[in-house]
């Protein structure tokens, strides 16, 4: 083969490979643009999906600027619905404890995600060298179950990119390069929205697995609840005329915005725990211990009209509680059966109702914790 | 590193750049393909690279020794270590724990409960494919079907060739090795077809992932499921395994075409098969032909009086190849039974008219029976236990829980069927455009 023939064939080969490369890159860019257009069209982003978390994080500077001692109640939607910071503060003051509390209850975040979020809060407090006087952490048994984790799997990578830092993603990449690159791709090319999250969102109604703890709903109870909700919503409008619709609203100190009619189903009755979630819970307690003078782990009241655990589930719960106490060194306050909280105080099967439940529970917490703070 | 992950996109872009613009000469290209393939494999677990390379090196030199042997005894002498090495690797990594637990279970039946140790070793990705591929080389050389090629580099690169390394198709050395000795630049026609195959493969793989949920709902249910849910689950699994397997094969063939290599077709509209025999001519063709050439024919094939036994044994071991569990053996045995049954029925005089008929209704009936049998087979394949499989088969034949129009179960059933049909429509398009 002459050198001129050889060089012309090399040039032709390069042209082909050039076209291949261009096709791949153009195809991928097109796919990403379409995807971004689709997610934007559906208003899917960290701000809309984890709005309350984003708002709470952005309120951290204002919280840390408070002159008073700080209290934070951190965990799930049960805390969100069941804890009134304003009344807690008022009743604490009546007992001689000056404190400003905030509700950091976030629906949809299991302990795995809470642990990552706790790192961000700890970093913020560390950076300002600020301490939390009283950190209350809810241990939510049904947030820690296998069903809950299985249901969360499609959104894990999206939530990770929303909550973790680049350095944390890089640490994942060091152990699992493929997953690490996937996470960075989701963060920087997909606006934090993974394909699994999109599928889970659109297919949720078609793919719901049978629930262990779906509970029958009495029609009369349901109607009565609707009536009460209307009355309470009217009262809410009178009490807070300036409410701007935020999920995490600073003038409310984060309290009081949970939708009241939600019925959670997540293996509440059988309580088959997921090891990873229990470990994550223990870790986020440890994270908070670094920046808190007093850490309390609390089991919120359970609506015994609906939630009655069989002996084997109670046994599983006891084992997990004992482990948490052993590994954190904190004695858990189990208020599941506190007589002060009765079934009519709930907004649904699990959440305490606004006004009907959050106030008595705040009072109960004050009675429990004021002596602790006064004794310090 | 799976083809449908972002890391593969970056890998392939870098690969194309160096392969097309930097390494222009033959030998550097082969070196580069080898290094890229080992990086591809090592991204999953670099510790198993020596096993892959070791298989290649061992079989390369054994093939040379077989070719140099001057008596049939010496040839057999050199072939034996290749068989022992490849099947030994497979047995050790894939089947040892299954064998040990089965022995323990068997002894348990007689009241003995020995505490047999388990290895609990990680199963190297692609081991079932590359051991069969490597073994076929030494057997082909032994049989005189191909001359051993000089060039350890070329053989190792061919065995570890990344498009087909993880999930096939199972290539014969005679199909791929000559291509490494004379690497061709891809034609734009082939490249376009390659892109089409990769796109179809990606869609099928995504479809498979979506179908996994309704399949799991039926197969992982602790109790009974309704008629509609059981059929939805089985059809979803039929789509899932087809989308997974054939989608990955499509991508492998497409990627190879894009870089100038040709890999034969591995699936050809399998659910359109008109008999169990026809099904295996369309399903995982590289495996079924491998089993035919290297197991069925050595067992005697059609030549002796044990044809049906040979088919049954071949299918039984073919089932075991898919995984180390009794359910896979049961699946293989089931296919062995329906293939031998087909052969038996095709020889019956009263059915001669039916067998020879080419009317539309006969074809439809044959297709319906085959499809039904294949679905029953998938229950055995996917179930976590034989009891679970039998329970689901019962549910499939128990009239209960028929959905009302608009009910979710009915919608999922419709979507599942639509997914399955869509995959086949895409395949028809690909086959026609090829």
Image: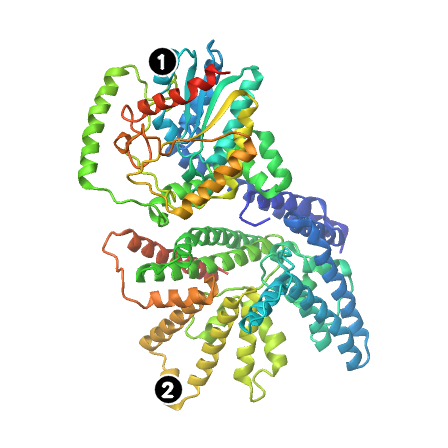
Chain identifier of the residue bearing label 1 in the image = A
Furthest toward the top, the residue is: A67
Looking at the rendered structure, the number of numbered marks drawn on it comes to 2
Q: Is residue B128 left or right of residue A72?
A: right
User: Is the Cβ of the residue at disc 2 closer than 8 Å to that at disc 1?
Assistant: no
Give residue B380's position: percent from left, percent from top.
Answer: 45, 67
Residue A287 appears in view: yes
Of residues B202 and A113, the one nearer the viewer is A113
Q: Which residue is mark 1?
A: A90
Q: Which residue is pictured at 51% across the width and 16% down the height? A: A376
Residue density around tag 1, few if under 14, some if 14–19, many if 20 or more, within 10 Å? some
Chain identifier of the residue bearing label 2 in the image = B
Is there one chain holding both mark 2 and mark 1?
no
The image quadrant of residue B355 is bottom left
Give residue B1's position: percent from left, percent from top.
Answer: 60, 48
Q: Which residue is mark 2?
A: B351
Q: Which residue is pictured at 43% across the width and 75% down the height? A: B275
Furthest toward the bottom, the residue is: B349
Is residue A324 placed above or below B296 in the rendered structure?
above
Q: CA distance from mark 2 to mark 1?
A: 90 Å
Of residues B146 and B58, the one nearer the viewer is B58
Q: Is residue A349 left or right of residue B78?
A: left
Quarter of the image with the N terminus of chain A is bottom right
Residue density around tag 2, few if under 14, some if 14–19, many if 20 or more, within 10 Å? few
Give residue A323's position: percent from left, percent from top.
Answer: 53, 38
* Labels 2, 1: front one: 1
Of residues B253 and A103, the one nearer the viewer is A103
Q: Which residue is pictured at 37% across the width and 75% down the height? A: B366
The image quadrant of residue B88 is bottom right
């Amino acid at each position: 083969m002459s050198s001129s023939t050889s060089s012309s064939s090399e040039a032709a080969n390069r042209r082909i490979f050039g076209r291949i490369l261009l096709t791949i890159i153009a195809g991928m860019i097109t796919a990403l643009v379409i995807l971004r257009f689709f997610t934007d069209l559906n208003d899917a982003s960290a701000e809309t999906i984890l709005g309350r978390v984003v708002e709470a994080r952005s309120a951290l500077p204002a919280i840390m600027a408070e002159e008073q001692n700080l209290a934070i109640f951190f965990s799930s939607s049960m805390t969100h619905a069941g804890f009134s910071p304003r009344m807690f503060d008022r009743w604490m003051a009546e007992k001689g404890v000056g404190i400003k509390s905030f509700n950091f209850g976030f629906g949809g975040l299991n302990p795995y995600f809470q642990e990552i979020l706790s790192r961000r809060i700890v970093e913020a407090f560390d950076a300002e060298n600020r301490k939390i006087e009283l950190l209350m952490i809810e241990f939510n048994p049904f947030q820690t179950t296998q069903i809950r984790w299985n249901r969360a799997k499609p959104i894990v990578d999206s939530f990770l990119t929303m909550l973790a830092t680049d350095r944390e993603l890089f640490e994942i990449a060091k152990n699992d390069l493929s997953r690490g690159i996937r996470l960075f791709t989701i963060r920087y090319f997909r606006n934090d929205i993974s394909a699994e999250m999109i599928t889970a969102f659109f297919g949720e109604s078609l793919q719901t697995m049978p629930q262990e703890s779906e509970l029958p709903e009495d029609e009369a109870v349901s109607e009565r609840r609707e009536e009460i909700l209307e009355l309470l919503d009217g009262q809410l409008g009178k009490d807070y005329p300036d409410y701007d619709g935020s999920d995490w609203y600073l003038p409310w100190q984060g309290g009081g915005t949970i939708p009241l009619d939600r019925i959670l189903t997540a293996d509440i009755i059988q309580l088959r725990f997921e090891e990873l979630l229990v470990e994550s819970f223990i870790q986020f307690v440890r994270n908070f211990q670094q920046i808190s003078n007093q850490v309390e782990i609390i089991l919120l009241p359970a609506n015994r009209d609906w939630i009655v655990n069989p002996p084997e589930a109670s046994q599983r719960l006891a084992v997990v509680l004992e482990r948490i106490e052993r590994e954190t060194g904190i004695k858990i306050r189990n208020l599941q059966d506190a007589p002060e909280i009765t079934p009519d105080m709930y907004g649904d099967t699990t959440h305490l109702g606004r006004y009907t439940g959050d106030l008595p529970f705040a009072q109960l917490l004050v009675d429990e914790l004021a002596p602790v703070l006064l004794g310090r | 590193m799976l083809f449908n992950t972002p890391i593969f996109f970056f890998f392939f872009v870098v690969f194309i750049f160096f392969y097309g613009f930097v390494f222009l000469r033959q030998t550097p290209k082969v070196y580069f393909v080898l290094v890229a393939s080992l990086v591809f494999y090592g991204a999953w677990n670099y510790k198993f690279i020596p096993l892959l390379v070791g298989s290649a090196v061992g079989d390369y030199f054994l093939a040379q020794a077989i070719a140099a042997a001057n008596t049939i005894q010496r040839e057999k002498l050199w072939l034996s270590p290749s068989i022992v090495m490849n099947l030994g690797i497979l047995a050790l990594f894939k089947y040892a724990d299954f064998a040990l637990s089965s022995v323990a279970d068997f002894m348990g039946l007689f009241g003995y409960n020995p505490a047999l140790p388990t290895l609990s070793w990680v199963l190297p990705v692609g081991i079932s494919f590359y051991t069969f591929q490597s073994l076929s080389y030494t057997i082909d050389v032994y049989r005189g079907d191909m001359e051993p090629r000089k060039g350890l580099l070329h053989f190792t690169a061919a065995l570890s060739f990344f498009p087909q390394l993880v999930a096939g198709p199972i290539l014969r050395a005679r199909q791929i090795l000559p291509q490494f000795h004379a690497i061709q630049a891809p034609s734009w026609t082939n490249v376009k077809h390659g892109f089409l195959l990769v796109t179809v493969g990606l869609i099928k793989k995504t479809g498979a992932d979506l179908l996994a949920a309704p399949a799991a709902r039926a197969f992982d249910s602790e109790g009974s499921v309704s008629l509609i849910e059981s059929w939805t689950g089985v059809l979803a699994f039929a789509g899932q395994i087809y989308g997974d397997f054939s989608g990955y094969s499509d991508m492998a063939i497409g990627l190879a075409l894009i870089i100038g290599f040709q890999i034969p077709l591995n699936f050809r509209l399998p659910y359109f098969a008109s008999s169990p025999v026809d099904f295996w001519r369309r399903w995982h063709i590289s495996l079924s032909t491998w089993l035919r050439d290297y197991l069925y024919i050595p067992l005697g094939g059609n030549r002796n009086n044990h044809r049906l036994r040979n088919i049954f044994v071949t299918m039984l071991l073919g089932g075991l190849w898919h995984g180390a569990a009794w359910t896979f053996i049961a699946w293989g045995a089931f296919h062995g039974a329906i293939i031998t049954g087909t052969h038996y029925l095709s020889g019956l005089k009263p059915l001669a008219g039916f067998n020879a008929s080419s009317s539309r209704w006969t074809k439809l009936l044959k297709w319906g029976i085959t499809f039904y049998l294949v679905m029953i087979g998938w229950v055995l394949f996917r179930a976590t236990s034989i009891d679970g499989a039998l329970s689901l088969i019962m549910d499939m034949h128990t009239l209960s829980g028929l959905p009302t129009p608009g009910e979710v179960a009915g919608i999922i059933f419709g979507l599942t069927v639509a997914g399955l049909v869509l995959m086949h429509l895409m395949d028809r398009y690909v086959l026609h455009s090829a």
